[in-house]
Amino acid sequence: MRVLWTEPAASAFRGLVGHIRQAVVSRIEMVSEFPEMYPVRQHQPYAGFRYFVVENYCLSYVVVEDAVIILALFLRARAASRAARMAWLKLRSAKISLAAVDPTQTGRACPAT
């Protein structure tokens, strides 16, 4: 399954270093193979978002057709789940674009399939 990133999520990922960055990459690789492996939030306004936690970071994503869309990556200490909600709303209304570059592979474009 393709993995697409919102620009805010890609930017946050680029700021990660060391073992946390590698752990996020590993989880995203698993999600691309098994997109429904993590729980779905049940409460509004974030109902329908899937998420996972790596140490102090939370990554929110949705599965749409043949793609996993990474909405937000943020420190859990921040009240940043709002960032995921805003990214999803903007994406739905086509006001933001998905990252054209896979932030997990420096300089490599996202695969088309």
Image (cartoon, grey):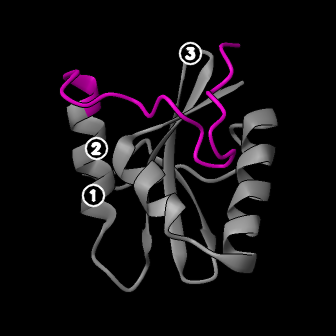
Question: In the rendered view, would you say 68 is above or below 54?
Answer: above
Q: Badge 2 is on which residue?
A: 87
Which is more toward the observer, 54 or 4?
A: 4
Q: Position of residue 113 (x, y in %)?
A: 71, 13
| Circle 1 crowding by C-alpha within 10 Å: few under 14, some 14–19, many from 20 | some
Q: Position of residue 43 (x, y in %)?
A: 34, 56
**94 in the magenta segment:** yes
Distance CA(mark 1)–CA(mark 3) = 22 Å
Name the quadrant of the N terminus: top right
The residue drawn where x is 30% and y is 38% is: 88
The residue drawn where x is 44% and y is 34% is: 99
Q: Are marks 1 and 3 in contact (CB under 8 Å)?
A: no
Q: Badge 3 is on which residue?
A: 65
Distance CA(mark 2)–CA(mark 1) = 6 Å
Secondary structure, magenta segment, majority class: loop
Which is more toward the observer, 62 or 13?
A: 13
Q: Which residues are magenta?
A: 91-113
Q: Position of residue 10 (x, y in %)?
A: 47, 50
Q: Which mark is residue 83?
A: 1
Q: Do we see residue 66 in this rendering?
A: yes
**63 in the magenta segment:** no
